[in-house]
Image: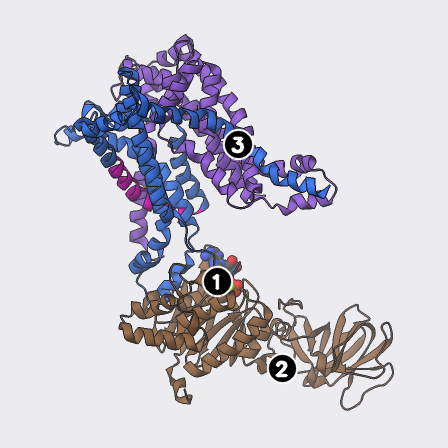
Amino acid sequence: MKLNLPKLLLGLTCLLIAIWLVAPTLVVIPMSFAGQKSLAFPPKGFSLQWYENFFTNPQWFGSLIVSAKVACMVAVVATVVGTMAAIGIERMKGRAGGLIRAVLITPMIVPGVVLAVGIYAVYLDTQLVGTWIGYVLAHTLLAIPFVVIAVGANLAVFDARLEIAAASLGASRLSTFFSVTLPLILPGILSGALFAFVTSFDEVIVSLFITSPQLKTLPVQIFSSMTRDADPTVAAVGSLIFLGTSVIIGLGLIFGMKGRRT
Amino acid sequence: MTLNTASKGAAIDIRGVSKTYGSFTALDDVSLRVEPGEFMSFLGPSGSGKTTTLNLIAGFTDLSAGEIRLDDRSIGNVPAHKRNIGVVFQHYALFPHMSVAQNVAYPLKQRGVAKTERARAVDQALQKVQLEHFSHRFPSELSGGQQQRVALARAMVFTPSLLLMDEPLGALDKKLREVLQLEIRRIHRELGSTFVYVTHDQEEALVLSDRIAVFNKGRIEQVGSGHQLYTRPETLFVGQFIGESSVLRGNHLTNGSDTALTVAGTTLIAPGQAQGDGAHVILLRPENLTVQPTGTGARDGATNIINGTVREMLYLGAAMKYEVTLADGSHVIARTPTQDEPFAIGSAVELAWNPKDGTLLADDGSTAGHEG
Amino acid sequence: MPNTSAQHAARGPLYLTLPALAVLLLVMAVPLGVIVLRSFSEPELGLANYVWFFQTKVNLTVLLRTFSISFWVTVCCVLAAYPYAFAMSVAGPRLRLALIMCVLVPFWVSGVVRTLAWVILLQDSGVINRTLLSLGFDKVRLIRTQLGVTIGMTQVLLPFMIMPLYAVMRSIDLRLLQAARSLGAHPVKTFFQIYLPLSLPGVFAGATIVFILALGFYITPLLLGGPQSTMLSTLIQQQVLSLLNWGRGGAMGVVLLVATFGILAIASPFMKRKYQMSGGSR
Ligand SMILES: Nc1ncnc2c1ncn2[C@@H]1O[C@H](COP(=O)(O)OP(=O)(O)O)[C@@H](O)[C@H]1O
Ligand SMILES: [Mg+2]
């Protein structure tokens, strides 16, 4: 290749962008070991007190448990509901499928605060503010588009003739679904579930509106801590989230690649 | 268009060219001269280095060693877009966002050809490929054959002195392929440019080319006309790749100016001397063999005779094809004029041929069977 | 019998989508309906809230600023994402994996945490300012300014630009560039005449998504911005939660909603991939 200079420039540009994408997030890691209660960078001293605080302070640890529970429920509900919808859309004839798909994706586009204000208004009237079901419903709404997209992408490459083949071999509709369709679209469903979990675990805008002191999710706790004082515990939480996310994505990519190769 | 256009073709001189990818040698010291106005085909199995050679000529890849000269100028330092070589790709490579006319006009635009002149040249090129009524269509609105015609028009509209084609008909069905083969031949005659045509289909190479270069494992095995390659193959690979053939293997002894080969206990004579001590074979073309009842003996100079059993008999209209199994288990194919009373499957027969119709070749280990 | 089973088959798909549609109805359609309703009915029936919105200078300033910040964020995203997505589309499998990781990891790490990182970096005594000082430059105010908000939002939204762009670029047949060169086009021309036009649908798709997401951004402007960089979402929240004025907040929400979907409607024809990219050899 003679294009060495352009190649070099491109490489350098991409390196800078990659740093710009990743490095700011990494800043929270040294912050989480700060010795003093300050968010000044670089941090002074070293301590594990912020991690300790996170795991022992009921405000923090409680909100983690709430978030994890809500996210698990959302992952289940949104995956089931979203997968059903994706299959329905794929089988629909004409323009109806495309229309319903477009409708189901709108929660991604509606401005967060507008949606949050609306949900808050409805929840006030129905006493859903600060309730489990309130969180799960709202987060499910926001997670459905991801599941529909992930499963839909998988269904699009799924060979529908396999279902006909299964039927010709004597399988009932239900057994065709569980023995042929489901195994083949499982990667899409799993990635949809993962998306749903993370969407809920991360959600902050709607949660800020429908939160209550008794039932608070982790992002809400982080947000209020950040607006209240310079507590490095947020950095500890951020580091843990960063670590968890990297591991999950890394594993996902590795297994995804393996799956595609076979 | 008349004969004088033939002078427009460029000569290619490939000298000791090699191409390596890491430790893998895709082309190994290849030399070849293509004459001006010649239709040269590169024929060989997939992976033999045909595309690599073409890409080196076109300037899409850099040489590892050697030199390529175009009309006696080295083109090593000329970038692809300045080589003025037309290229037709198997995958058409039509620009999807441009109409047929825009695609064909593209090379002219790059060369700063004035608008009116451009339109005229585009019309003419599209006429040549019989697509003058499709100029406003987009590539996605054309069939595969039509797309390849557009690609052809685009590659020749700037009258390059050299046109390279890499399996241009590979994606089309047989019928369409034959039609386009005729068109390509006609266009070659009309343009007078040098054509280099890559294919793995020996029939296509035979139909189209003045000469054929047979590629195998990154080397050129033989260059010659289709007739030369068929009647006088220099290697077993070439003999087997071009046309139908049978191979007899056995131990060889020099026998005066000829060579004697013992095959399944029978001594057979082949013209010429063996080269070196390695194993040798006799290559036979089916039409040179006579199938006769056992014990008939030599007739009309067909003094090589070997016994076998009819394994398969096919009726082909004007001809019959026999597959005969010899005592050593090898199979020989013979083609004879249609007989009123053909030999039944399982009957014992004799195969006879004139020794000069067999070709003695060093056994390079290649086996029959090439893709069609 | 075939009749009923055919009917069943025709209706089956619709039933499958009903649960999802029900969630959408309850948690999105009804709430948005309530917002729209209140914007026309509180405190009394009429267009008063909209008249107020468009006659108050502060509102118009914020609206304009929301658009202008979104615009600059989009421009920055396009400029950064184009070379990056291109590199992704031509890189070997390993490098591509690394590049994708660099996009996905921050994408998945909570937006709040990433904004926290920017707060740390951009603050007056933060790394950037100290570097500037040590290089002999003046301090720049980054936090609580539009510049700071733009920097933070660009980083958060960049993945939304890279992914659709990459999807389109990956489908571009690079052999077309070879073809163009054989036809006499200089590599630079090859890029502008062939590659760029074919990648434009991806640019439009990414830019549209980034722009409309930026319009509704809330957390990042709130934490990185100040009074001089308030965006519309913050104003809505203030009206509803601080002033308890549902009517005015609703009207602002409707404005934002209309802007978002209006832009989406205008832009969507440009996001379609008009051309079949495949060659004939498949
Ligand atoms: N870019 C490349 N990198 C590594 N190996 C290559 C590359 N291009 C071609 N090869 C190898 O070189 C050999 C010759 O390829 P090619 O010239 O395309 O063969 P063909 O005769 O089928 O056109 C093949 O084994 C192929 O795998
Ligand atoms: Mg090839």
Q: Residues within 10 Å of mark 1 (few under 14, many from 20)?
A: many
Q: Whole-percent x and y of residue A61? A: 43, 12
Does mark 3 have its CB less than 8 Å from ligand 1? Answer: no
Residue where numbered disc 2 is placed: B231
Q: Whole-percent x and y of residue A211? A: 39, 15
Determine the residue positioned at 45% across, 68% down: B54
Residue where numbered disc 1 is placed: B91
A112 left or right of C51 in image? right
**What kind of colouring is applied to the model shown?**
by chain
Q: Whole-percent x and y of residue A202? A: 41, 24
Q: Which mark is residue B44?
A: none
Task: Tell me, by letter, which chain the rendering colours brown.
Answer: B
Spatial CA distance of label 2 from label 3 is: 69 Å
Q: Which mark is residue A82?
A: 3
Q: Is residue C249 above or below residue B136?
A: above
Image colour assigned to chain A: purple
Image colour assigned to chain C: blue
Asked whether residue A18 is in view, the answer is: no
Bounds of the magenta segment: C70-92
B143 left or right of C59 in image? right
Q: Is residue A99 above or below residue C195?
A: above
Q: Are marks 2 and 3 on the same chain?
A: no
- Marks 2 and 1: which is nearer the front? 1
Q: Quadrant of the N terminus of chain C?
A: top right
Residue type (three-letter) at the residue carrying disc 3 = Gly
